[in-house]
Amino acid sequence: MAGAQLPDVNALLQGFRAVEPGVEVKVFRSGTGEVVAKVRAELEAGNPQPDLIWVVGEGLFRELSAKGLLHRIPPSFPGLPPQYVYEGGKYYEVRLLHNILAVNTKVLPKEAWPKLWQDLTKPAFRDRVVMADPNYSGPALVALGTLAKRFGFGYFEALKANGLKVEASNPVLQQKLARGEYALALTNDYGVRQEIAKGAPLAIVYPKDGLIFAPTPIGIPTWSKNPALAQRFLAFLLSPRGQATFAELGYMPVMPDAPKPAGVPANLVSLRGEEASPEVLERFNALMGLRR
């Protein structure tokens, strides 16, 4: 499982156990890169383990689908918009995760906040911008792929020249942003909302040219030993209680009538993101001096 912090996963599991008493759920939680690598290694060894997979990005699910390794769950969730049902029900979206810009309000006054993604390359933000490592972070991999496709890889070369920093993960950089070690971050929305709820001096900037939607699908592989129970967990996540829990944790729910996190504007411009290709990731690693 990736794309959700362990305390958030535990909150969802607590809600699930309330409707499924006595159920024991074991979770492997890490960054998307590590979760995907683990699943692939288990498949190669002929001993895949998870009953349910939940990661950022569609790449792994497309691989599994092409090999016939995903259960199809007929769409039967009232109110779920059809764009969140993938390949006829082989995997689903259960909450919405976006890449946004976050600022430390004590370090960067409001009049100096960026308005567009390309603003990050301006001299005013030299040595003040950070993002997560796309080798580990699924949202960062989606941001890399989407922005490189939209503006060309030169966009990241300009960010590097302007002093872009890379941290291991979004939670790490969000905490450093809250402490004032950075002024501005390209990061995920829910984590910033959680830091704000704790009293951190942060604010979310929704770029006028579109925040980046990072797909975070969930699906049941054909090797699952408990497919019926896994399907009930999926149904819980899409239930009113599950959707309300997402909102309480700072996530945008997928159900249109579900409550939204506090402070989310009514009308947002959203771009559907896509993961960076291996070639783009390799170029980024070389540019930033990252391991691979």
Image (cartoon, rainbow, N blue to C red):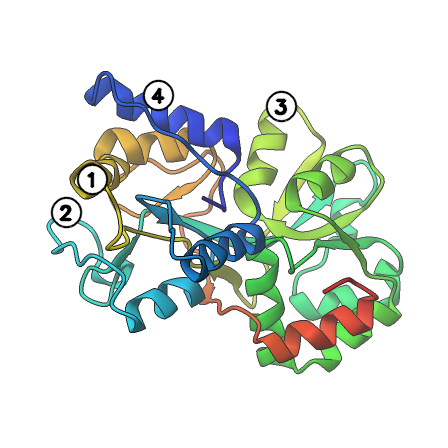
Give SS at disc 4: helix
| Residue in front for this viewpoint, 176 or 51 | 51
The residue lying at 83 percent from left, 68 percent from top is 160
Image x and y of residue 114, in percent: 71, 58
Q: Is residue 182 left or right of residue 276?
A: right
The residue lying at 18 percent from left, 65 percent from top is 88
**Which residue is denoted by mark 3 in the rendering?**
198
3D distance between C-alphas at marks 1 and 2:
8 Å
3D distance between C-alphas at marks 3 and 4:
22 Å
Closer to the N terminus: mark 4 or mark 1? 4
3D distance between C-alphas at marks 1 and 3:
30 Å
Closer to the N terminus: mark 3 or mark 4? 4
**Which residue is denoted by mark 2 in the rendering?**
77
Closer to the N terminus: mark 2 or mark 3? 2
Q: In this view, does 145 lie above or below 19?
A: below
Give SS at disc 2: loop
